[in-house]
Image: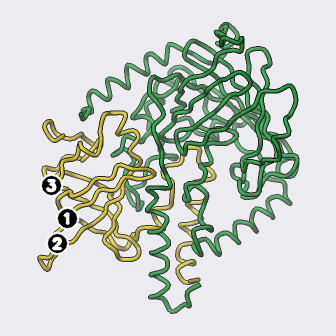
Chain colours: A yellow, B green
Amino acid sequence: MSQHINRLLPLLLLATVLALASVLASAHHSFSAEFDINKPIELRGKVIKVELINPHSWIHIEVTNKQGLKETWMVEGGSPNALFRHGITKNSIPLGAELVVIGYQARDGGNRAVGRTLKLANGQSLFFYPSPLPTGVQ
Amino acid sequence: MIVNRATSLRLVATSLLLLAAVDTVGAAEQYKAPRTSWGDPLIEGVYTNNTNVPFERPAKLGDKAFYTEQEYAARKNAPAVVETTTNPTDVHYQTADFDLDPEQNPMVRNPRTSILTQPANGRMPPLRADAQRRSDAARAAQQAHAFDSAQNRPLQERCLLWAHEGPPLRPVGYNTLVQLAQTRGYVVLMTEMIHDARVIPLAKSRPDFGGLKRWQGNSWGRWEGDTLVIETTGFSDQVTPRGSGVPMGPEGKVIEKITRTGPKSIRYEFTVSDPSLWDVPWGGEFPMELTDQPLFEYACHEGNYGLPNTLRGIRKEEQTSSRKPR
């Protein structure tokens, strides 16, 4: 326990300092405690479920691994409320759409990841940054 | 429907122009607030406090409390780099992907260089020496057992309370809406994130609250002219004021003032004092603007996969380390 605590202490301290020192908190929990910076991943798969929920959105995709087997991954993103204000709902992301996720895997090695970038197969960002969904993909 | 980026930017620009037409600083004195049917100043509505003004002033600005118009124009669309933008090496999603950066949405005009206005340098006063020692010890103890259980995780991560809800209320990076509701004898202040509704009785002196104690203290209010003055005392040891790491003492107090400054604007002021923590009080102010948007649900606990995921990861690492799990 103390081994990983020692490793996490600087990150935890940073997260605590940021949470206390910054009026504009960026997330509701420490992502560095949930995901492993030493496990970068790139996933390509089809959307099978969309959860635009708080405190964080989760998009489920079906990925074919190197052995040719299908596995399901959950990808974590941000609070969806601002998306709702622009009319984006879970139905805005079509099931079956191909998604490319670059991010980091969960610390426990499970099929969960945080999406640093979430892009459609054509290279466009899923939501807002740096560009919206193309016309017709709604 | 997906709003394209150009449309979003036009909406933001239009809104900024509209908001720029309302200067909340000093406007309250010229504005006479409309009244409720029972005669109180009317403050209810859904407001946003979206801003990129930092809580503490950058040290290099010293006592400079306001930007010039030119400086403000140059800065108002600048990303709030320190507070919100995620670092490329962070293990974090990009907030802009989800339209969560302040500059992606209409910001309330505020030419101040910091939310904090007291002390004059716009920076938090230091803790008293004894309070700092208690703070250091509390943080060390917390960090040593930070991942032992869900109960050891921060209140925010447990979906119990976000620090910006206050009192004092503070601007937050996203989901910035605040709803004020009025009835005869009560004012309710509710934040979208994490849907905390603070019911504030109006009285001539502090009510006894029937023995009930809120973690964030018990608030009561009174009208002083057109300003609602809210006094909060009796904070629990579950919450710690900003940057302190230790709870308020029995003399800890927060005073908030809400004043309608225009047809669509209010000014929120706050002062925090506790002689067990600081030698001087600290406080500040920020404007809020009415919005036609409703508060959206923020059902945090139901979707909080992050908390069990975090603890699951730690337990897994314990199994693969040479150390005995807790």
As drawn, is B309 to the left or to the right of A95?
right
**Disc with the residue nearer the chain's start (1 vs 2):** 1
As drawn, is B110 to the left or to the right of A50?
right
- Up-down relation of residue B44 to residue A109 (above or below): above
Q: Residues within 10 Å of mark 2 (few under 14, many from 20)?
A: few
Query: Residue B305 placed where, x, y %?
Result: 43, 62
Q: Amino acid at mark 2?
A: Lys
Provide the secondary structure element on which disc 1 rests: strand
From mark 3 to mark 2, how far is it between C-alphas?
Answer: 14 Å
Q: Amino acid at mark 3?
A: Gly
Placement of the N terminus of chain B among the 4 image quadrants: top left
**Disc with the residue nearer the chain's start (3 vs 2):** 2
Residue holding disc 3: A96
Residue holding disc 2: A70
What is the residue that sits farthest to the front in this orientation?
B210
Q: Amino acid at mark 1?
A: Glu
Residue B60: tell me if it is visible.
Answer: no
